[in-house]
Image (spheres, rainbow, N blue to C red):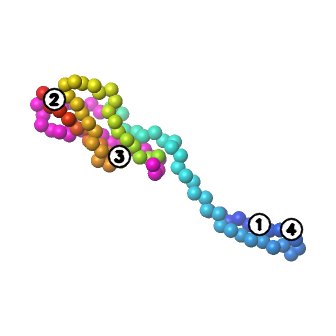
């Protein structure tokens, strides 16, 4: 925020002032980052637990630029499947969709 001042060249000069408010909008200049770079999980095949793990990622941008979407990449197994269940914009559950046995 700052004040701007304008005057004419007459004598005596006339003038006016105004307040200028500048809002700096966020740019999408930060990539989302997982809390840990690698998640190593070991799940017994006869487990009854549906939630395998909860992962956390954050994006320091603000507004829509800071909202993140999770997905599973490179997982193709005909034996079992997983899905991600969002808990919030920052947390997601890694959940089994089929038996591991």
Mark sitting earlier along the chain (2/3): 3
Q: Position of residue 47 (x, y in %)?
A: 12, 34
Give the dominant element type of the magenta stretch: helix, strand or loop.
loop
| Mark 4 vs 3, N-terminal side | 4
Q: Are marks 4 and 3 in contact (CB under 8 Å)?
A: no
Label 4, label 2: how far apart the Cα atoms are: 84 Å
The residue to which callout 2 is attached is: 100
Looking at the rendered image, the quarter that the C terminus falls into is top left
Direction from residue 67 to residue 101 in the image, left or right: left
Q: Is residue 8 left or right of residue 60?
A: right
Q: Secondary structure at mark 4?
A: loop
Look at the numbered disc 2 and give the secondary structure of its residue.
Answer: loop
- Left or right for 41, reference 57: left
Q: Which mark is residue 6?
A: 1
Return the x and y of residue 13 as percentages of the image width and height. Answer: 84, 73
Q: Residue at x 78, y 71 (%)?
A: 15
- Quick check: is 42 in the magenta stretch? yes
For disc 4, the marked residue is: 9
Mark 3 surroundings: few (<14), some (14-19) or many (≥20) residues within 10 A: some
Q: Which residues are magenta?
A: 39-64
Per the rendering, the mark at residue 90 is: 3
Q: In this rendering, would 6 be left or right of 77?
A: right
User: Label 1: few (<14), some or many (≥20) within 10 Å?
Assistant: few
Of pointers 3 and 1, the one earlier in the residue sequence: 1
Label 2 and label 1: CA atoms lie apart by: 75 Å
Q: Is residue 92 above or below residue 38?
A: below
Q: Label 2: few (<14), some or many (≥20) within 10 Å?
A: some
Label number found at residue 94? none
| Image quarter of residue 49 | top left
The answer to whether the residue labelled 1 contacts the one labelled 4, judged by CB atoms less than 8 Å apart, is: no
In the current view of this chain or complex, which residue is farthest to the front?
Answer: 78
């Amino acid at each position: 925020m700052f004040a701007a001042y304008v005057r004419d060249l007459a004598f005596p000069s006339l003038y006016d002032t105004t307040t200028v408010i500048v809002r700096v909008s966020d740019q999408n200049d930060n990539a989302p980052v997982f809390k840990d770079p690698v998640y190593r999980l070991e799940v017994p095949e006869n487990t009854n637990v549906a939630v395998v793990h909860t992962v956390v990622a954050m994006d320091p941008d603000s507004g829509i630029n800071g909202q993140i979407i999770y997905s599973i990449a490179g997982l193709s197994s005909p034996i079992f499947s997983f899905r991600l269940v969002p808990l919030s914009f920052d947390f997601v559950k890694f959940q089994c969709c089929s038996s591991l046995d």
